[in-house]
Image (tube, coloured by chain):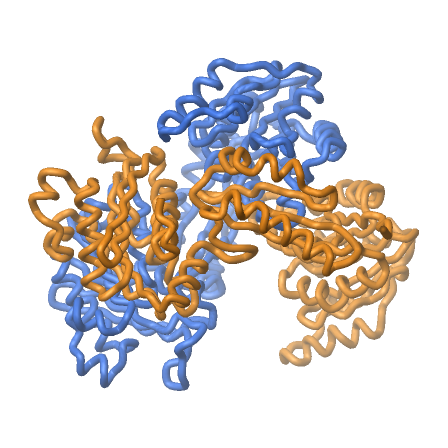
Chain colours: A blue, B orange
Amino acid sequence: MVQYKEVKAEILSIGDELLYGQIIDTNSHWISQELDKIGVRVVRRTTIGDSRASILEAFSSAEERADIILMTGGLGPTNDDLTKPLLAEYFQCGIELVPEALEAVRTFFEKRGRELTQINRLQAHLPTKCTYVPNELGTAPGMWFQENGKVWMSMPGVPHEMKKLMSDHVIPKIKEIFPLPHIYHKVIKTVGIGESWLSELIKDWESGLPQHIKLAYLPSLGQVKLRLTGFGEDMEQLEDDVEKEIQKVRLLIDKYIYGYNQETLQEAIGRLLKIQAKKVAFAESCTGGYISHLVTTIPGSSDYFQGGLIPYHNSFKNRILGVDENILKDKGAVSEETVIQMAENVRKMFHADFGLASSGIAGPGGGWAEKPVGTVWIACALNGKTHTKKLQLTQDRMLNIQLTGVAVLNLLRQCIEGKTE
Amino acid sequence: MVQYKEVKAEILSIGDELLYGQIIDTNSHWISQELDKIGVRVVRRTTIGDSRASILEAFSSAEERADIILMTGGLGPTNDDLTKPLLAEYFQCGIELVPEALEAVRTFFEKRGRELTQINRLQAHLPTKCTYVPNELGTAPGMWFQENGKVWMSMPGVPHEMKKLMSDHVIPKIKEIFPLPHIYHKVIKTVGIGESWLSELIKDWESGLPQHIKLAYLPSLGQVKLRLTGFGEDMEQLEDDVEKEIQKVRLLIDKYIYGYNQETLQEAIGRLLKIQAKKVAFAESCTGGYISHLVTTIPGSSDYFQGGLIPYHNSFKNRILGVDENILKDKGAVSEETVIQMAENVRKMFHADFGLASSGIAGPGGGWAEKPVGTVWIACALNGKTHTKKLQLTQDRMLNIQLTGVAVLNLLRQCIEGKTE
């Protein structure tokens, strides 16, 4: 077997606002995951403030430990941002205007109908030893250095800007420069089953996995991802091995699987609706627009999302959505009867194939003995039949909104696939 | 003036699962905030794996920089957890059974109806130089060391266990041991102006700030926070000094300020609507429910949020919301005329005081020369007058949704406050 030298990386997050806890650093976690996927070993993550001594010390000790040094933050146009001048100092070079970078900043502002300020022009001045990497989503450019067999990349701290630079530039360049082992990842996405129940169902399969394939459980809100990672030297063989294991485990947990890898639940639903050329509409009470928001974050969702109604104040459940007044009075807004009518009526109102509804007590106020905070009813109406489900969730408002969102989308998925329980 | 020696802290997070991105580290962010509140300056946060060399190196370099070293993780009962033996090695002492700790672990298991395993007994063996700190919520005890004027605390990585140890033990002890300065923070929250324009407007005020008050810019999506931090010995005086500066800067940027400290834009709007006993409704096209979702994450929003409509497919802008068919045909769905009717009609439909509307091309598809991706119209209808605004945003769908959300909420804020541009 080919021997690979372990490629090590260190991640630096720069900014007083991180150290003082004003901003939460999600970047280094995300970068860790991306490096892990391509077989680069993160050996350390360091967060330092806007201080010359700290940053320079972090540069030199990172260089001792790692082959790849990735940093975020400290690139703003204001004076307290030190990353750029200190990179120039560390690499013993000057800072000069890069016309291409100036053009990019100018275009960025022009598109937004704004004029370039003097401060923004400074963002186009870069250390002469760096390669300019365009940041299409912001004004602070990426800076790539390659010195003594090591690579350095400085990126802005704004997460979506950093992510684009990483995906478009950093990851491909690292793969090009360093000989990395073959790693094949596949993530199975499940919904509607908890981690411990899932692990019970698949424990025999899990203990029979071959040595070169590892399994990790990655639980999140209402969902569990199963990540299979295969290590080896023959990529085709590796893919085959992992796919074979996935075929085996599918037999055990098929009804909980909605997709693979990056696909989100709302993307999977979009895919299913497009295949069947079906349309959907939502009547959201306790979720207050959250589900429609999830669905409409997906490009092309206008192909299948007709629209939604949020009859938050109860009177509009009757006035606009036409829920029977007596049902609202006798059974209450949080009841099976109400969500059935909400789902059926929103389906008709928006000429949809599937009408979904949520109604519940998100909290923290509004609960009572019979219907405590966290009681939620959901429904999915299709032609001729309406499926309902009662959820008993938590005391936390945000969590209740999110968990209801997952449950509604899962009910929709089951209805589209014709696999209701 | 009393001279305080700056008290410095370093935070170590220990565990391979953090470095590989399998678990997100929320502990160090929380600890940063708690230390910041009491005037301890965090100088560095380091995440290292379960490796002897890394951990020992991190110990010694942290000791060089900081007076207080707080660490989490690496305390599990299994072999790959190294924090405890390495602390003993670092402080050159043995590890012995602490009967009090054994009693605590035994009780912990008894309460849960479980028997103590041999592995769990080992958790009651501690370095002889540490002070045992009981962990009421778990089985790994806290370990407190005091050596050469520095303090060290090792805590489990489970967030709620760590938080209880910090609040009950670490913070009070730090306050007792170190003479700390008084610190007063206040954050000014602004919206509708970019960082560079804001800094232009306040540059004279900024350069005239007294020595003991520091300013930081904290930009996020469509918003900028200004954090003022005052240091001193007389808390009352300090508050006065900071508040005086805030009064001065308010004169320069009043119309962009929506709140202070933790308050979010949607909370500020809730506060304003409650004071005036006014109600709001949203007609969301390109934002697809996002704004209603933001508003309904706030507890008590049912007091002022009447509801919303998402006429995503254009036909429903006419059929349900009653936008003039000819306007939709002649001017298009993304036009000033359309959002005016959407805002006015949703206001009537939901018996609201303010009716808000969004219509735009979120992308990535759907744009053309005249109306490229990122073109958005928004409107706010109130009694007798409707305010509109055209936005020219980005190529990124999610970003366009979020930036439109901020712009709509800001337009609503301006209308409630009667401060429209």
Residue A354, position as x, y percentages in the image: 18, 59
The image shows residue A144, relative to residue B227, as above or below, that is above
Q: In which quadrant of the rendered view does residue B338 lie?
A: top left
Residue, x 59% and y 32% (percent of image)? A78
Task: Quadrant for the C terminus of chain B, please.
Answer: top left
In the image, B251: left or right of B126?
A: left
Of the pair A183 and B331, the residue shown nearer to us: B331
The image shows residue B75, relative to residue A260, as above or below, that is below
Residue A329, position as x, y percentages in the image: 23, 83
Of the pair A124 and A180, the residue shown nearer to us: A124
Residue, x 44% and y 34% (percent of image)? A237
Residue B87, position as x, y percentages in the image: 83, 53
The image shows residue B122, relative to residue A220, as above or below, that is below
The image shows residue A115, relative to residue B143, as above or below, that is above
Residue A6 visible in the snapshot? no
Residue, x 67% and y 63% (percent of image)? B163
Residue A112 visible in the snapshot? yes
In the image, A108: left or right of B318?
A: right
Residue A297, position as x, y percentages in the image: 32, 46
Q: In which quadrant of the rendered view does residue B391 lie?
A: top left
